[in-house]
Structures are given as C-alpha cells and as structure tokens.
Image (cartoon, grey):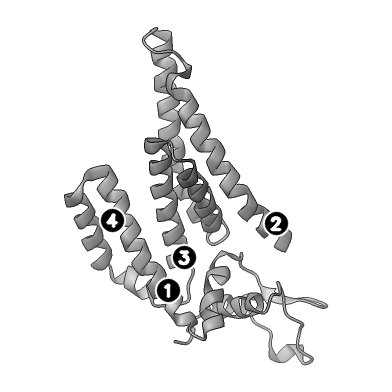
C-alpha cells in the first residue's frame, strides 16, 4: 500500500497535489531536506517531472483514501477489454487464450499491484485498440472519440509506449487506403465507397485526442 521506488513516490505525490485542485505544490521552507531526483522544485513550484496521465488516474483513489486500489482495478478492466477486443477479432477461443496469457503474466500482476504508470498506460492502449476497431467496423463515432481520448491519456502517461502502440492502427489504415486506391485504378470500386469511413474514423479519433494533449500542454 506504500510506494517502493522513486517513480511511484513521485506519481503518488503528484496525484495528491491534483486531488487538492492544484498542478503544483508550494516548496517547503527547508528545501534541502526534500530534494528528490524525480521531482522539480523551483522558486515557487514543486511537482513531479512526469506527465500527468497516471497521477490523474490515481486522484479518485487518493480522494477515497485508497490509492493502492487504482492499479488492481485498472488491471482487471484491462483483462476485460482485452477479452472483448480479442473476441471481436478472433472469436471466443482467441479471447480466452488472451485472458489466460494476461493472468499467467507475473509482470502484469506485479505492475498492477504498484503505483507505476505501466498499468494505466496498458489500460488506455487496450481501450484505444478496442475503440478503433469498433469505430471502423460499426461506423461508431462515439467509439472513435473514446479511442482518441484513450490514446491521448496513454500519450500523457507513457508517451513513447503510446506512440508505438498506435503504429499498428496507422499502418492498417494506410494499407486499407492503398487497397482502395488500387481498386479505383482497376475501376472496380469508386474511390469514395470506403475511403470516407477511414477518414471519419481518424477525424473523430483526432478530435478525442486533442483535448487531452491540450490539457498536458497547458499544465506544462
């Protein structure tokens, strides 16, 4: 129930600041006693050096006095989302296999029981992929908006992980556009037949992504 490494201490500290409605704390009078490698302390501000995605997710736990519950809760939700994603793509057998692999992973359990941001990022990356697939398959704008929001939250939790995670969706969309253009050249399909679906998915996704990015830029 207590943080054990510097990253965890810092994110929990920032979550407590956010829970009070602030982006930073006032530096203590005796600064040398509170210097910490993962924190920034300047003339009138004291805050974590990390982006705000994971501390934001810890805020409800801090307000309830149980921040340690956030990691396990997000871990459980991630398994459920992964099941739904795999079920939609490969059926029940694949979905069960994915769930078993999650539950057999020591790393997944260790990180879900910590204050580290890995579980938060994994949750939002999984939510992004689920929303992206649903948005395209069902022309569901709300799912596309949710995917954009999830990608934004992943980006302000672990930016490089989020950037890597969205590559499959970008490549897949690019391949579909190339296929459409190829069919157009072959005069087998009109260019607007399916292309509009992809444009709509990416447009709604961007609309969901930008507010989260804007919040992080404002906080900076």
Q: Is residue 40 visible?
A: no
Residue 115's place in the image compared with 32, above or below, is: above
Q: Residues within 10 Å of mark 3 (few under 14, many from 20)?
A: many
**Of pointers 4 and 1, the one earlier in the residue sequence:** 1
Q: Nearer the viewer, residue 213 or 108?
A: 213
Q: Is residue 123 visible?
A: yes
Q: Which mark is residue 71?
A: 1
Residue position for label 3: 120
**Of pointers 3 and 1, the one earlier in the residue sequence:** 1
Q: Nearer the viewer, residue 1 or 31?
A: 1
Residue position for label 2: 217
Residues at discs 4 and 1 in contact (Cβ within 8 Å): no
Q: Which mark is residue 83?
A: 4
Question: Residue 61 placed where, x, y %?
Answer: 51, 79
Disc 3/disc 1 C-alpha distance (Å): 7 Å
Secondary structure of residue under mark 2:
helix
The quarter holding residue 156 reads bottom right
Disc 2/disc 1 C-alpha distance (Å): 25 Å
Disc 3/disc 2 C-alpha distance (Å): 20 Å
Tell me the residue at 48%/18% (across/down).
Answer: 192
**Of pointers 4 and 3, the one earlier in the residue sequence:** 4
Q: Nearer the viewer, residue 197 or 35?
A: 197
Question: Residue 27 placed where, x, y %?
Answer: 76, 84
Disc 4/disc 3 C-alpha distance (Å): 17 Å
Secondary structure of residue under mark 4:
helix
**Of pointers 2 and 1, the one earlier in the residue sequence:** 1
Tell me the residue at 77%/76% (across/down).
Answer: 45
């Amino acid at each position: 129930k207590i943080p054990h490494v510097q990253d965890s201490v810092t994110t929990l500290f920032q979550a407590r600041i956010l829970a009070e409605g602030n982006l930073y704390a006032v530096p203590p009078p005796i600064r040398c006693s509170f210097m910490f490698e993962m924190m920034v302390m300047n003339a009138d501000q004291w805050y974590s050096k990390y982006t705000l995605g994971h501390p934001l997710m810890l805020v409800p736990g801090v307000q309830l006095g149980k921040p340690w519950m956030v990691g396990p809760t997000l871990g459980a939700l991630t398994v459920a989302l992964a099941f739904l994603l795999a079920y939609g793509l490969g059926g029940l057998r694949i979905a069960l296999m994915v769930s078993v692999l999650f539950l057999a992973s020591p790393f997944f359990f260790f990180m879900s029981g910590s204050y580290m941001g890995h579980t938060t990022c994994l949750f939002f990356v999984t939510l992004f992929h689920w929303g992206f697939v649903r948005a395209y398959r069902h022309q569901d704008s709300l799912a596309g908006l949710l995917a954009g929001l999830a990608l934004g939250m992943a980006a302000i939790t672990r930016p490089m992980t989020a950037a890597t995670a969205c590559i499959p969706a970008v490549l897949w969309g690019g391949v579909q556009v190339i296929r459409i253009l190829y069919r157009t050249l072959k005069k087998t399909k009109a260019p607007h037949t399916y292309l509009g679906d992809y444009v709509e998915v990416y447009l709604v996704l961007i609309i969901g992504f930008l507010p989260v990015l804007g919040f992080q830029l404002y906080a900076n």
